[in-house]
Image: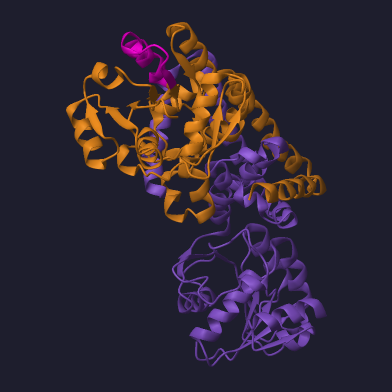
Chain colours: A orange, B purple
Amino acid sequence: MKNIKKVAIVGVGLMGGSLAMAIRRRLPKVKVWGYARNPHSLRRIKKAKAVHKVDTDLENVVHDADVVVIGLPVGMILGYLKKIKPFLKRGALVFDLGSSKGTVVHGAARILPKSVHFVGCHPLCGSEKSGVEFSRSDLYRGTLCLITASNRDKAAWRVKKIWQAVGSKVIFMSPERHDVLLSCISHLPHFISFSLTQLVPRQYLYFVPASLKDLTRISNSPAQLWADIAFANKKNIIKDIQKFIRILSKYGTLLRKGDKKKIAALLARANAKQKYIA
Amino acid sequence: MKNIKKVAIVGVGLMGGSLAMAIRRRLPKVKVWGYARNPHSLRRIKKAKAVHKVDTDLENVVHDADVVVIGLPVGMILGYLKKIKPFLKRGALVFDLGSSKGTVVHGAARILPKSVHFVGCHPLCGSEKSGVEFSRSDLYRGTLCLITASNRDKAAWRVKKIWQAVGSKVIFMSPERHDVLLSCISHLPHFISFSLTQLVPRQYLYFVPASLKDLTRISNSPAQLWADIAFANKKNIIKDIQKFIRILSKYGTLLRKGDKKKIAALLARANAKQKYIA
């Protein structure tokens, strides 16, 4: 940690901005720079006081950085790796915060030279909110961060130290296992939530009970971001959609058959499992 | 309201108990009696101080009551209407709190004599919690109560006054329209939540993010109650399951086709609608 003097954040939104704030708080000797794509976002980032210095010149921000954090949506990560490639210093650590990892990690290996170290990261504290305005230095405290590398990888180990410094617990797993896991616990649930919101007719919105509000809340998540996530983890999501449909349609079949006992038994099993979620 | 001297609550759980408390608070001249099925529930109801008097003798509770509230799960309502029928006083108002209405309202019309008035009610403030311990006098304040009768029905009008007294806003609709509405905004969402909990493997439960917690919360709802609700509103739920599957599987098809633009457009439409839910 001693040899980290400058951290560059490319993509200072909720996640990147919060990481910047947390690093400034926990590692006060580190200088944190942020990249702003245009004067408008430059003003927003300045106002949020997320970083020490913000600049619209990508080279200025990335140049000399010991650590570069890509806080961009999944669909933009590889494009920005290509952009920053010429400015990266030898031995720099680069990591992202994206929600699907296979395409990102393998893409990064293709794009970046061997002289820099890319580590895929996914802190599990996403939110349907977005924007640097919502950043807070304690966003990562007590959360899990998945690092898609072997725990014997030196660069991954250094990145782990950063996450631990901001209060996250780190778990190592392969990008493939990460994507299977996330499809199930996050990507599929988002598409279920989006679909449910689509299904409810507008004239029913007045009656929506608290339970349905909870189920449709994340259908507020940014459309383009989620279209990108879906395509970056397409294979697993298609499978999970099919699995889910099989389970749900079973209820339709049992209702048609009149098998109330079997329905009650399935629901009771869900009851038992739900206790471990809460 | 002046001619209500005694209210009997048959089924003093979360909903019935809360209504008892609210009536005692808002209509202090009314005497509220509760029925307990056995000595164990008698102790629980006494401890919760929900009613003035609690008794395991159904006749004692119902006899002479001007209003009888059936606070039982949907699957038990008709059975209890048969039981209380011999004890009901001429002109008594009887209403339930069940989540599906067609089978209950038509069943009640078959079971009860013309000399008493049955009104189907569904206060939209259910919870995955159950039990008289969770009762509170303000449960109904600011909520909606659906009454499945014509607003020209005199008995329904008297029941409306009671709901208004405890802070509910009343909306009249036919039992058929109620069941179509509830299938969409409550019953289908519950079966989606149950199915999602079933799908998540146990070894993933450690990773469950806040978003999935919200989506699976109501899969904690009582299995037998929900098996009964499902069968009482079978036709609509089967249709809505099919509708939902069509919407969700569309995402699978578009992912396979590679149509990211169409996916982003569908998600954006859900985003726009979600704003009216929140």
Left or right of residue B131: residue A198: left
Task: Report whether B270 appears left or right of B87.
Answer: left
Where residue B23 appears, as percent x and y from the top left, is: 54, 82
Residue in the image at 57% along x and 51% along y: B186
Q: Residue at the spot x=43%, y=31% of the render?
A: B267
Question: Mostly what secondary structure, the magenta segment?
Answer: helix
- Between residue B21 and residue A157, name the one nearer to us: A157
Q: Is residue B254 visible?
A: no
Q: Quadrant of the N terminus of chain A?
A: top left
On the image, the x and y values in percent for residue A207 come to 46, 55
- Tell which residue pokes out farthest to the front in this image: A2
B195 w.r.t. B149: above or below: above
Identify which residue is drawn at 39% across, 11% down: A90
Front one among A67 and A30 = A30
B79 to the left or right of A39:
right
Q: Is residue B225 above or below residue A173?
A: below
Check if residue A86 falls in the magenta segment.
yes
How many numbered marks does the figure carry?
0
Magenta span includes A135: no
In the rendered image, is residue B214 in sight? yes
Residue B49 locus on image (x, y percent)? 64, 83
Farthest residue to the left: give it: A39
Residue A256 occupies quadrant: top right
Query: Could you tell me which residue is drawn at 61 percent across and 31 percent down?
Result: A184
Query: Residue A255 location in percent, x, y?
Result: 73, 43
What is the magenta range? A75-94
Q: Nearer the viewer, residue B99 or B23?
A: B23
Q: Taking B43 as reference, is B194 above or below it?
A: above
